[in-house]
Image (cartoon, grey):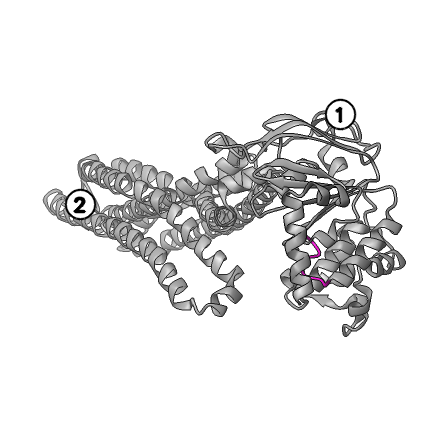
């Protein structure tokens, strides 16, 4: 885990090394200063001011050097920790970009967001404490104990009695806190998932007046997180009293024993200045132990966060581009040879089974079927968003697994039923299809997608702002913009996954006519619920329960009087009644 995380330090390695080096300088000065202070106190009874001035100058120089080292250590620690966190987010984000749909499903969107935000912040805090405080505290503890033994070993034995007690207490606290933090982060994911669903579906929630239910659902998950945090905070709260009891108990013993030694020996075995330095070292040891306890608590929290981050970083996508993969898609021909798909090994059934389908380049194929008949699953195999469980999918005569993924997907444009627009202008969204598209090309594809008319009516035309998720345009307008975005790429294969469901039949017909004229050599696959959207296709595929139930032209399927005929007849009667 540490090796994986360390890879994200990269260009901040120098800052991460300089932080503890400067910290060593700061701690060294802080541990030597009490000795000089002891000499200063012992010489205060002297009438010679030269010694006092000399010790004062030495203390001032040491304090300034300690201050300089502390400032530099803090500066490098801030740079290293912030840079490390930025690199971690970068690495997680880029790893997620390579994930297949099944990988994202395995982690869940809300969990990935939590790992990239909350978990990274926890690890950042721990990293900063490790390179700074985790160096300072042990060094301060060790140096202070050594200096104490140098002054008077008999009195310093008190520290050796206290340290094991504190160590045992910290171990017990950490051992009880670790398992709870592991449970907390799982509940964090559940809470974030609840928030994400509620925000994304806020219109549905309000339409069905389900605010109360959603509030109750959130309060339940939030309450579970609160309950766990309250319990673990009670455990961690024992840390402070334990530190104070041991620290101040040690100081009382030192004061008592030191005072007796000074009085009984006439200040020959120990001087008042040495007792004063002993008290300073006692405070330093106490503070070191308290900082160590803070490190233990922070690391306890971040340990689970680090495991969750590393889990993402070490996940290799189930879909990979082969070395020296094919970069040119010859044509838009598509072949399914005995294809079966199962989403995961635990699934009891195949989503697709025994699909044998051959589509010539430039043909228009219509796919129709009931909800859940795996129409979308079928077309997701073409750009290799999923891999087959059995059989082979070929595009342009080559197995899709032989292609470079970027090259393959650039030649296959998919317009989904659930269309997504991004914040930016209309032009920005269209250029997702091709970055170097000219304004004239953008206008041309928007005319074909029947989007030009409503775009020109927007306040700034093609430079009008699209809100995040396309909330300031209607469902039909969103679909037409997404079709234009797909057309601008001039792909070998164009897939429309029920992407005209929100437009009227006249607009649907105009779009299909425009596609035929604009992309005559492109293979077009149209998934639809309306028979009118596919009846002019060269071939119509009827899906049922993950298999091809019927195939043929519109007329041949009507004559067959099967599933397609029933759908056509019901829609025709509905139209006549209307």
Indicate whether 9 appears above or below 226.
above
**What secondary structure is found at the residue carrying circle 2?**
loop
- Span of residues in magenta: 498-504
**Residue 338 among magenta residues:** no
Q: Return the x and y of residue 336 as percentages of the image width and height.
A: 70, 30
The residues bearing labels 2 and 1 have C-alpha atoms spaced at a distance of 83 Å
Q: Quadrant of the C terminus?
A: bottom right
Q: Tag 1 or tag 2, which sits nearer the N-term?
A: 2
Indicate whether 212 appears above or below 336.
below
Indicate whether 93 appears above or below 467.
above
Residue at 80 percent across and 66 percent down: it is: 462
Main secondary structure of the magenta stretch: loop
Q: Return the x and y of residue 514 as percentages of the image width and height.
A: 85, 55
In the picture of the structure, the residue carrying the numbered disc 1 is 324
Mark 2 and mark 1 residues within 8 Å of each other at the beta carbon: no
Asked if residue 455 shows in the view, the reply is yes
Nearer to us in this view, 135 or 115:
115
**What secondary structure is found at the residue carrying circle 1?**
loop
In the picture of the structure, the residue carrying the numbered disc 2 is 267
Residue at 77 percent across and 45 percent down: it is: 555
Is residue 11 shown left or right of residue 21? right
- Decide: few, some or many residues near mark 1? Use Cα within 10 Å; few <14, some 14-19, many ≥20: few
Q: Return the x and y of residue 190 as percentages of the image width and height.
A: 41, 50
Q: Of the residues tagged 2 and 1, which is closer to the observer?
A: 1
Task: Specify the quadrant of the image occupied by residue 395.
Answer: top right
Nearer to us in this view, 468 or 474:
474
Picture disc at residue 384: none
């Amino acid at each position: 885990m540490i090796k994986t995380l360390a890879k994200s330090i990269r260009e901040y390695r120098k800052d991460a090394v300089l932080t503890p080096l400067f910290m060593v300088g700061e701690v060294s000065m802080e541990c030597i200063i009490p000795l000089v202070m002891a000499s200063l106190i012992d010489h205060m009874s002297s009438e010679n001011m030269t010694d006092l001035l000399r010790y004062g100058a030495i203390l001032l120089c040491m304090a300034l050097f300690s201050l300089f080292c502390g400032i530099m250590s803090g500066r490098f620690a801030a740079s290293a920790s912030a840079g490390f966190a930025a690199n971690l987010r970068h690495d997680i984000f880029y790893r997620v970009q390579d994930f297949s749909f099944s990988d994202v499903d395995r982690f869940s969107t809300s969990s990935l967001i939590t790992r990239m935000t909350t978990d990274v912040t926890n690890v950042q805090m721990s990293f900063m404490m490790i390179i700074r405080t985790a160096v300072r505290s042990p060094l301060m503890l060790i140096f202070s104990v050594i200096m104490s033994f140098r002054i008077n070993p008999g009195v310093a034995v008190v520290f050796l009695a206290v340290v094991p007690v504190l160590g045992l207490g910290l171990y017990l606290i950490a051992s009880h806190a670790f398992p709870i933090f592991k449970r907390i982060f799982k509940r964090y994911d559940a809470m974030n998932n609840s928030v994400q669903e509620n925000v994304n579906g806020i219109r549905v929630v309000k339409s069905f007046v389900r605010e109360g239910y959603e509030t109750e659902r959130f309060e339940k998950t939030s309450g579970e997180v609160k309950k766990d945090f309250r319990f673990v905070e009670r455990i961690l709260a024992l840390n402070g009293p334990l530190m104070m009891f041991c620290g101040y108990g040690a100081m009382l013993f030192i004061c008592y024993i030191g005072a007796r030694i000074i009085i009984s020996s006439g200040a020959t075995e120990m001087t008042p200045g040495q007792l004063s330095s002993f008290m300073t070292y006692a405070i330093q040891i106490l503070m070191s132990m308290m900082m160590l306890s803070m490190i233990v608590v922070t690391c306890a929290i971040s340990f689970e966060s680090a495991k969750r981050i590393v889990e993402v970083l070490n996940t290799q996508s189930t879909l990979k581009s082969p070395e020296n993969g094919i970069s040119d898609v010859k044509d838009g021909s598509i072949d399914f040879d005995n294809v079966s798909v199962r989403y995961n090994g635990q699934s009891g059934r195949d989503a697709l089974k025994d699909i044998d389908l051959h589509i010539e380049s430039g043909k228009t194929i219509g796919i129709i079927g009931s909800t859940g008949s795996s129409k979308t699953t079928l077309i997701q195999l073409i750009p290799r968003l999923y891999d087959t469980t059995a059989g082979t999918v070929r595009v342009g005569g080559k197995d899709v697994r032989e292609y470079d993924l970027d090259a393959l997907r650039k030649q296959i444009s998919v317009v989904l039923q659930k269309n997504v627009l991004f914040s930016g202008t209309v032009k920005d969204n269209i250029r997702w299809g091709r970055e170097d598209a000219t304004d004239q090309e953008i206008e041309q594809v928007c005319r074909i997608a029947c989007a030009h008319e409503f775009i020109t009516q927007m306040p700034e035309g093609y430079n009008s702002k699209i809100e995040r998720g396309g909330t300031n345009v209607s469902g039909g307008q969103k679909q037409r913009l997404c079709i234009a975005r797909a057309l601008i790429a001039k792909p070998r294969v164009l897939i429309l996954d029920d992407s005209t469901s929100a437009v009227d039949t006249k607009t649907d017909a105009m779009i299909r006519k425009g596609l035929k004229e604009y992309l005559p050599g492109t293979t077009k696959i149209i998934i639809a619920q309306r028979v009118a959207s596919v009846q002019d296709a060269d071939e119509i595929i009827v899906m049922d329960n993950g298999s091809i139930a019927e195939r043929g032209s519109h007329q041949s399927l009507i004559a067959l009087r099967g599933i397609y005929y029933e759908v056509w007849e019901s829609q025709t009667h509905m139209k006549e009644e209307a």
